[in-house]
Image (cartoon, coloured by chain):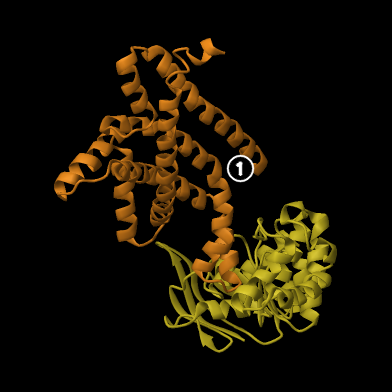
Chain colours: A yellow, B orange
Amino acid sequence: MIQVQDLHKSFGKLEVLKGIDANINEQEVVCVIGPSGSGKSTFLRCLNLLEEVTSGEVLVDGENLTDPKIDINSIRSRVGMVFQHFNLFPHMTVLHNITLGPMKIKNMSQSEAEAVALPLLEKVGLSDKAGVYPDSLSGGQKQRVAIARALAMEPKVMLFDEPTSALDPELVGDVLQVMKDLAEEGMTMVVVTHEMGFAKEVCDRVLFMDEGIIMEEGSPKQIFDDPQNERTQAFLSKVL
Amino acid sequence: MEAFLNSDYIKPMPYLLEGLVFTLLITFAGLFFGFIIGAFTGLGRLSKNKFIYGLSSVYVEVIRGTPLLAQILFIYFGLSQLMDLNMHKLVAAILAIALNAGAYIAEIVRGAVHSIDKGQMEAGRSIGLTKNQTMRYIIWPQAFKRMIPPLGNQFVISLKDTSLFSAIAVGEMVYKAKTYYATTFTPFETLTMVCVLYLLITIPTSIYLRRVERRLDV
């Protein structure tokens, strides 16, 4: 589903990604862990070109994102993204947040878009919030709306950028549950997270990043129970 | 009643109200075009295109760095001479307000758009909207709300600025007052009424704006 070859990304003189190679298969759930500043989020943001790639290749759903002729909007509509700070549209109701994409990009009528949105709201447990504005929601509810908004475009891959980092601890569970359900349905997911419990339980594969490269990767069991790399060991000893 | 209507305060009113019509006409028409100019220039100031950015910046700096009276004279006399035409005073006045307010509105627009969290643009782009669509459906509606209070202030400023058009004999309120008291020798009474009329517009506008500001919570 996603192939990344020798991906480099620099901000000015600062090289944040120093050659990333990764493959993400269909229906796979891959967690990216690592200390802050390791380039995890930047890596994720390169997968839908929210960050311009400096060099290397990123193939998503068979299309090369680094090809200058690529229709990036079409790719992005197939790659859902969930942000740390939700980024809901505050001037629109919850329902309108979700229907905007289908209406403007897929040219659905309002009733068609609502027929897509309402079951998604039910899925994330917020059917009763369709008519309210995001300001009146808790952080966990906002994030679940954000997930529904991304799902409304029927993406083939979902990218999660620290989806629970901005939440109060008691609200994390609901969001993780929605993500877990999604994983069980077979959604391809790339999750940058600090939730080691989630990584252990739900992920098929864990990538440990540090200093702009993937230092170690493997099954959750390998990474958490028997890390080989010194950096991985040091990081895990701090967070577990 | 007779005495009231014949007082030196009330007698100039028909002239002043006639002037007020022009004052309001110039203000509204000027700000209408000024907003269009300001919206484009404000977005130009946010553009990554160096040429567009440069052009917008030069315009904003030139207008903000020169006095309005000089701009008015420049447009009415200077441009007429340069282009060898006889510009209508009212056209010159509306043009002057539009160009002047446009520069200030550009800064209002730039500030408001800039103040919208960049996560909003990213969220819009990430669901597949183009940059223009995101601007139109997501950024602009939020930014516009934040523009309302400063645009209201600009309305008050431009309204008062129209008094400078007395310099080119546009029949707005101050010019009407001047021609009136030149024959009646009652400048105190006449100008008092001019100020009262301005305040009758500016004070309610300010109160209304404060209320809007509180309601928008911006």
The picture quadrant where one finds residue B162 is top left
Residue drawn 47% across the image and 27% down it: B198
Q: Chain of mark 1?
A: B
Indicate left or right for A7 with A240 as reference. Answer: left
In the displayed image of the protein, which residue is found farthest to the bottom? A62
Depth check: B108 or B158 in front? B158
Q: What amino acid is at disc 1?
A: Val
Residue sitting at x 56%, y 71%: B129
Percent from the top left, x then y, of residue A52?
Answer: 47, 71
Residue in the picture at 68% in, 72% down? A150
Q: Nearer the viewer, residue A79 or A179?
A: A79
Looking at the rendering, in which quadrant would you find the N terminus of chain A?
A: bottom right
Q: Estimate how packed mark 1 is, as few (under 14), some (14 to 19) or many (20 or more) residues with alpha carbons within 10 Å.
A: few
Task: Locate the C terminus of chain A and report the quarter of the image it occupies.
Answer: bottom right
**Residue position for label 1:** B218
Q: Position of residue A13 (x, y in %)?
A: 40, 62
Answer left or right for A106 relative to B198: right
Q: Nearer the viewer, residue B23 or B82?
A: B23
Q: Quadrant of residue B203?
A: top right
